[in-house]
Image (cartoon, helix red, strand yellow):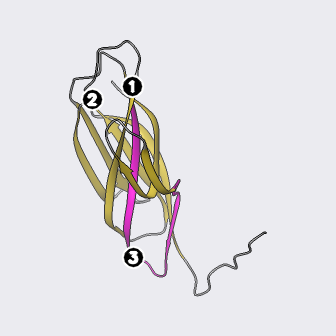
């Protein structure tokens, strides 16, 4: 079964097979909105799968589910992943970016993003959802 080399949430991500991936606003762990519930327009889930030579050229089920603090589902998806390549002995890492559009966030608190490979949970990310007050926090910039 492939291992997860890395997984994180970002504002946006673009992946081209066999090349570098591009991330905008990587490392999202907190989302705030003016009121609850609110719709968050877009997040990207970026997952790097490490595959051995034996695991390449085989289908693997990749899935995720976003859950609210009460365990209810916010979003989910699954699909098949196949990494093609030479039968070299060294491992390869393939990167996948999954777009999460219009997330309906109804409650404040710690949400989870659970990533599964071949039906087994392999990674869990935390995403805190909060409501901001009427005032934005003061921002200070150091020069």
- The local secondary structure at tag 3 comes to strand
Query: Decide: marks 2, 1 in contact (CB < 8 A)?
Result: yes
Give the side of residue 91 with respect to residue 83, left or right.
Answer: right
Identity of the residue drawn at 21% across and 24% down: 58
Gap in Å between the C-alphas at discs 3 and 2? 37 Å
Look at 49% across and 81% down and name the residue there.
Answer: 34
Q: Is residue 130 left or right of residue 95?
A: right
Mark 2 residue element: loop
Indicate whether 116 appears above or below 83. below
Q: Residue furthest front?
A: 19
* Quadrant assignment, res 134: bottom right
Front residue (pair 48, 111): 48
Instruction: Give the label, 1 or 3, closer to the camera.
Output: 1
| Quadrant, the N terminus | top left
User: Which of the pair 96/124 is nearer the observer?
Assistant: 96
Q: Which residue is mark 3?
A: 38
Q: Judge whether 103 appears above or below 124 on screen.
A: below
Task: Give the magenta part as a residue range.
Answer: 26-49
Q: Which residue does the numbered mark 2 point to in the structure image?
A: 83
Mark 2: give few (<14), some (14-19) or many (20+) Cα within 10 Å. many
Residue 141, by quadrant, is bottom right
* Cα–Cα span, label 1 and label 3: 39 Å
Tell me if residue 89 is in the magenta stretch: no
> Which is more N-terminal, label 3 or label 1?
3
Residue 126: % across, % down:
50, 52
Say whether disc 2 or disc 1 marks the residue closer to the N-terminus: 2
Q: Which residue does the numbered mark 1 point to in the structure image?
A: 92
Q: Quick check: marks 3 and 2 in contact, CB under 8 Å?
A: no
């Amino acid at each position: 079964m492939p291992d997860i080399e890395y997984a994180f949430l970002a504002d946006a991500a673009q992946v081209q097979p066999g090349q570098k991936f591009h991330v905008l606003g990587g490392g999202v762990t907190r989302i705030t909105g003016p009121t609850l519930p609110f719709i968050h327009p877009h997040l990207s889930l970026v997952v790097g799968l490490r595959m051995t030579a034996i695991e390449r050229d085989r289908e693997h089920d990749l899935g995720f589910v976003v859950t609210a603090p009460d365990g209810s589902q916010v979003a989910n998806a699954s699909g098949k992943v196949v990494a093609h390549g030479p039968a070299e002995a060294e491992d390869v890492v393939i990167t996948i970016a999954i777009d999460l559009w219009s997330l309906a966030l109804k409650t404040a608190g710690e949400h989870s993003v659970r990533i599964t490979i071949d039906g087994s949970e392999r990674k869990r990310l935390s995403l805190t959802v909060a409501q901001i007050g009427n005032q934005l926090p003061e921002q200070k910039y150091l020069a």
